[in-house]
Image (cartoon, coloured by chain):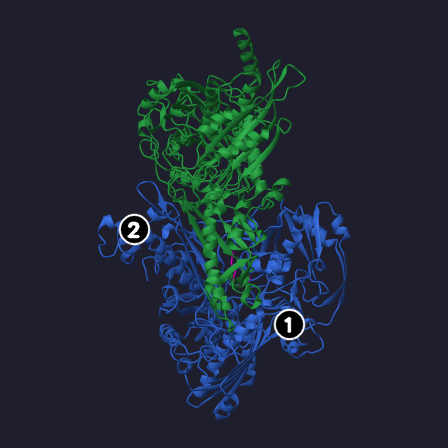
Chain colours: A blue, B green
Amino acid sequence: MGKVVGTNVKRKDGIEKVTGSAKYTDDLKMSNMLYGKVLRSPYEHAKIISIDTSRAEALPGVKAVITGKDFPNVTGLYIGDRTVLAIDKVRFIGDAVAAVAAETLETAQRALQSIEVKYEELPSLVDPKESLEEKDLLIHENINDYGHADFIHPVKDSNISNHFKLRKGNTDKAFKEADHIYEEEFEVPMVQHVPIETHVSVAQSQLNGKLNIWSSAQSPDALRELVGVVFEKPLNQIRVDSVPIGGGFGGKAGLNPETPIAVALSKSVPGRPVKITYTRAEEFECATARPGLVARYKTGVKEDGDIIAQEIEYIWDGGAYNDYTVNVSKTGGYSCAGPYEIPNVKGDSYCVYTNRPVTGAYRGFGMCEIHWGIEQHIENIAEDLGFTPLEMRLKNALKDGSKNVTGEELSNVGYSETLELTAEQIKLDETEDTENPNKIRGKGIAGGYKGPSTPPNAASSALIQVLADGSINLLITATDIGQGAYTALAQMAADALGVSIDAINVSTPNTDYTPYEWQTVGSRTTFSVGNAIINAAEDAREQLFDYASEDLGVDIDDLDMEDCIIFDTTDPENTDKQAPISKYAIGLQYADGSGRGGQVIGRGVYIPEDVSNLDENGQGRTVNHWTYGCHAAEVEVDTKTGQVEVLNMISTFDVGTAINPELVEGQLEGGLVQGFGTALFEEFVYDGGKLLNKSFVDYKIPTAMDIPNIETNIVENALEHGPFGARGVAEPAMIPAAPAIANAVYDAIGIRIKDLPITPEKILNALKEKEGSN
Amino acid sequence: MGKVVGTNVKRKDGIEKVTGSAKYTDDLKMSNMLYGKVLRSPYEHAKIISIDTSRAEALPGVKAVITGKDFPNVTGLYIGDRTVLAIDKVRFIGDAVAAVAAETLETAQRALQSIEVKYEELPSLVDPKESLEEKDLLIHENINDYGHADFIHPVKDSNISNHFKLRKGNTDKAFKEADHIYEEEFEVPMVQHVPIETHVSVAQSQLNGKLNIWSSAQSPDALRELVGVVFEKPLNQIRVDSVPIGGGFGGKAGLNPETPIAVALSKSVPGRPVKITYTRAEEFECATARPGLVARYKTGVKEDGDIIAQEIEYIWDGGAYNDYTVNVSKTGGYSCAGPYEIPNVKGDSYCVYTNRPVTGAYRGFGMCEIHWGIEQHIENIAEDLGFTPLEMRLKNALKDGSKNVTGEELSNVGYSETLELTAEQIKLDETEDTENPNKIRGKGIAGGYKGPSTPPNAASSALIQVLADGSINLLITATDIGQGAYTALAQMAADALGVSIDAINVSTPNTDYTPYEWQTVGSRTTFSVGNAIINAAEDAREQLFDYASEDLGVDIDDLDMEDCIIFDTTDPENTDKQAPISKYAIGLQYADGSGRGGQVIGRGVYIPEDVSNLDENGQGRTVNHWTYGCHAAEVEVDTKTGQVEVLNMISTFDVGTAINPELVEGQLEGGLVQGFGTALFEEFVYDGGKLLNKSFVDYKIPTAMDIPNIETNIVENALEHGPFGARGVAEPAMIPAAPAIANAVYDAIGIRIKDLPITPEKILNALKEKEGSN
């Protein structure tokens, strides 16, 4: 802990954002800019027979019209299953078929209407369970030929884009030893990130071949890499300039279709920027959603409550294209049992194609989905065996020295501590009665864990440039997607260097300048970029102290810097042995005017330590650390209306070290509210493959009026390799909210809802059924 | 010399510029942009009694009106003699008095007309010789209080902004030993850089205090530093984004007034960009000009032609504000005797204020001006003593081992070689007759030298980022002001690294990202930035070879890289001992997926070696190297019209190593043409302090039709500490053109024009006078 780390520094981007003066990508106006629009499939599965763009091309003001065949290269970080525009067939309602760029948005829209596409409808698959079994009707006929990461395993001649297998211990043997075996199935629907800013990109192809991109994308380097592959361009011929991002939550990870479509259009009009901004309807239907999940558990337990065996099957509804979701299914697979130590586990996690919207990364990267079942299933078992939910969890919880499902021996596990603290705070054992007999209160708790995204070789970098006046430019390519990254990173830079927070400017990411960053996803930024920054600061200090040592006549090992002043630690009050950082910013200058060295530029890189790929049984250590915590909820269920009112919630997470407690609190509250939304309101509703609720009228997210009273607890068990002890918390903060509410509902009225969201209809139906069966 | 260095690589910025698709600062259109205009003094010297801006402020569409009193801080790299706008008095016609920002340019112009300023006229000084002597009428009453660099010496209670003194040997004694003493005076008028792009800046003050600047300025870091001082902002709160520059020639060095005025206006309208673009008339009258010079020589020579003593007085007409020109007068002072070895020299170089346009840096930084006299004076002496111009020069020329006027012992001096080659090529001794008796031909030669701007502590930096596919981003803050810097620097980076030229992208300077660069001036970029790049490349190679050594099992010292392939120099054909640069771009990855290190980022800095400040007698070594060369001209003078037609010119310079021969040729031709323009056409014409020729109708520069036949010779004596042996040549290439033409005119008709330009009127008058005296 330093002087700045641990304090509530104001957000670096706060003023611009709260005053509305921040300029997002859609705010960018450029001379000669064109507007792009995309023609989309009305069918969930159909062959494209022909596309006639001639009338569109002839429209005055239309500058470019493109179809898929002109751009055959596939995109994909983990599996290459998608082209810029659909070529031979469409796979979901909303699949991009053609695109135009025109002088005005109105002209572009009119042009779309004049494109004639002939389709031949195909039978479709919208149920992931059916899709898993289906062998004849393939959504991706060429699945056998798709390129993919070596840790992704598509199944030949199937709709399965990934099958992750985990085998720990011997479940067959263990089930025989179990006193009780429980089987349950849970479901999670597709939901959406619903960022305030819809997806938007501006692309400009310069005459000299350079490609400039401004985008809402949350990972500029990943975007550049994917665009480079699609358009066969060297990376340094692509510049991605990161504009403030209006919320990411994973939905702007990787490459989203509007970017390559804007690029493809821009190639027809060299020099002219082309902007594509999704409408809200496009955002719902055509941007990525969170995958749906069918989760099946078979659990073997001893009489004393020890869980000794578990068979888990996850079926992820990846929708029409599965790039990121294949990796979600892997992560869901290697985390499959939740934060519990189970000696024998058999896990199978399948990602399947369906003719539904495209899915991808979403806050939690599968963890919200799997904990929905895990954290209800364990309570059902507890109840059957006569344990309280807390007892059952504490008995089986991962602890220091536990081995998780991948066989990794754990340390720094604060899970039980968060459970106990939270249970005590919410008084889990006490329930208040209301005066209204139709309004029943209940309390619930649920835990969760996630390995922040620190896979092997996911590198971060930082550059620290000391300017002539001693102020600092910090160069990183991690983006601030609303989580406050620039502020937390600046705080770590300040303390790692020994300067004030005001001395640090975070230069916004721009791939022509800022150093390599793998991706801004998976709660990894504080941890991974923070470590890179610490290394860069150390490098800068070495250079500064080299100059200072010569200039001040102090042994280099005796120098330190605080508040931008370099001083002799053996004689800290001696001002003759001190100098401001600015004195050595551009090297060392002698009395005769001559100099040595030059600008101090600290360089730091970081790759997660002690992690490697998992073996064929999913065993090994593949994430650097885990973050643990829990949510508790107190609800009041109206048995006449089925309405659930969440009165109070508590969020408790072990964050290692809170770099900025208010920002952490913001993450804990924000994650909780997002989880609360998925618990009660959010889901994609379909007619077959047709998304019915693609507007805020029909797709509900919580407003400020809906949000319960929230308390947060920041537990700090410093993480050994974390920067200043910090670990990632952005996603974990969302994970257990929905099952905590479900458990509270069960506590109140004895009704267990196994498929999200918990709607009044489901509760009323369940109550009716219960009554009927009574 | 490497594979790329020495070849004619196409300009990196060529396609964009020749097709007109490059966007210069004035091309920038931003949302909500305002237009700024400046109200200017109609008087050459006057007190400001009052300024009433109320009517302007009330005009619809006017968003900001500012006057000088709101911005009292002074600007200046070398002497702080100027405020953003004039405060108490105006010092030249065109001095900025008030400024407005409005929704349209027309509104801004109308607003200017409604500002009422009351002046009280003051007596003025427009003759630098008078100004030098004047003690009562001071243009800058506060000169005694002005802050200035420690090597600048303003004279108390005078109009002298700098007095540089040089004392080498003992001139009093030497003149007594001289056989002949010659005294002459020469004059050079103010001229202008005349860039195609006039001065232009866009400034935006964000609500959070960050200042964004887009500018035609040629030195982004210097601009940032000066803006920081004026507006009391930390450097990292100012972002200067370098847009393509439409010609610099020194006129866009440092801080030009349109930038701080745009910044000052922008502070009244947070978030809104304010653009100020100079009209051509403003460019002539209000941007910086080249200072005028009065040059006086008194030279003691032995009968055998040895120059043994010289007293030199330079009076630089710095105009109303002298920031850069005080340094020009210093440079003119420490280079005062030209490329000749003279054992005893007394030099006094004065920079004086006059009520004329502001002057500053201009290609050659004083060297064109001083050589105008030096290179004619030596021929007059030669003629008197019976030597040819070539003999006289060769006899006194600086050679290896010579001591120049600052007492520095020289090496690598190729001056004589360039003279001999050029004299032979032009056949200096032979003159062709024409058929027309009124058209007389003559030939002339003139030499010159300049120390490219490599003062002590003028640091350069470079960052080399290796991207994941092995392509390279080169980060520098040196700008391409038309000289082709990006191309030459990319070539050096390619060879220093061992990659192809296509692998290198030069990221355009942006002070939020690119590393420190002192200034882009004085022919220093190739030398200084080139050396920084070599150091950065070495640093990148060390990182790459560290990974490669482990991966390939080859001793690190045995590794080399060519064409982006790292290989074992002891077994260069063995492909098992080779890997592409991309393999290690983001660190080393092992078979199990884990990694080590991270992105390869080479960091290089450079400060000129073995230079320090001069002592109080102007003695010492203060520039890292000198560049020598000469021009020759063949002219035809029409004795009836006085018209001089330049038929042929030759340019010969020792460039050390030509990094890109075609670019060097371009510099040699461009410099020659610019010198040719000043020889025959260019000068500021005044009525008192009023500039009369502030348009292309009245101020003539050469067109393609005027330009003589040009031949260029590139002499290559590799410079020991030059990058690949290169030395700076951009300015030297201009220096001797005017005296070479003057010498040719003298050769033709025996008329010596001592004040530039060589106009038909002057020739006719001189011919008439000569006839009269005959």
Picture layout, residue A155 above or below residue A706: below
Q: Chain of mark 1?
A: A
Pointer 1 or 2: first along the chain: 1
The residue located at (56%, 44%) in the rendering is: B660
Pointer 2 residue: A550
Q: CA distance from mark 1 to mark 2?
A: 65 Å
Q: Which mark is residue A353?
A: 1
Picture layout, residue B321 above or below residue A539: above
Q: Answer left or right for B11 relative to B324.
A: right
Q: Chain of mark 2?
A: A
Q: Kindly indicate the quadrant of the structure image that contains residue A330.
A: bottom right
* Secondary structure category for the residue under label 2: helix
The residue located at (53%, 7%) in the rendering is: B774
* Secondary structure category for the residue under label 1: loop
Q: Magenta region, mostly helix, strand or loop?
A: loop
Report whether mark 1 lies on the same chain as mark 2.
yes
Location of residue A79 in the rendering, given as x and y in whole percent from the top left corner: 61, 68
Picture layout, residue B192 above or below residue B540: above
Q: The disc labelled 2 sits on which kind of residue? A: Glu
Q: As rendered, which of A448 and A756 lies closer to the eye?
A: A448
Q: Answer left or right for A598 relative to A280.
A: left
Q: As rendered, which of A70 and A306 lies closer to the eye?
A: A70
Location of residue B641 in the rendering, given as x and y in whole percent from the top left corner: 61, 14
Farthest front residue?
Answer: B304
Q: The disc labelled 1 sits on which kind of residue? A: Tyr
The residue located at (43%, 29%) in the rendering is: B340
Q: Which mark is residue B469?
A: none
Q: As rendered, which of B532 and A74 lies closer to the eye?
A: B532
Is residue B106 in view? no
Give the magenta range.
A246-251
Confirm whether the magenta stretch covers residue A553: no
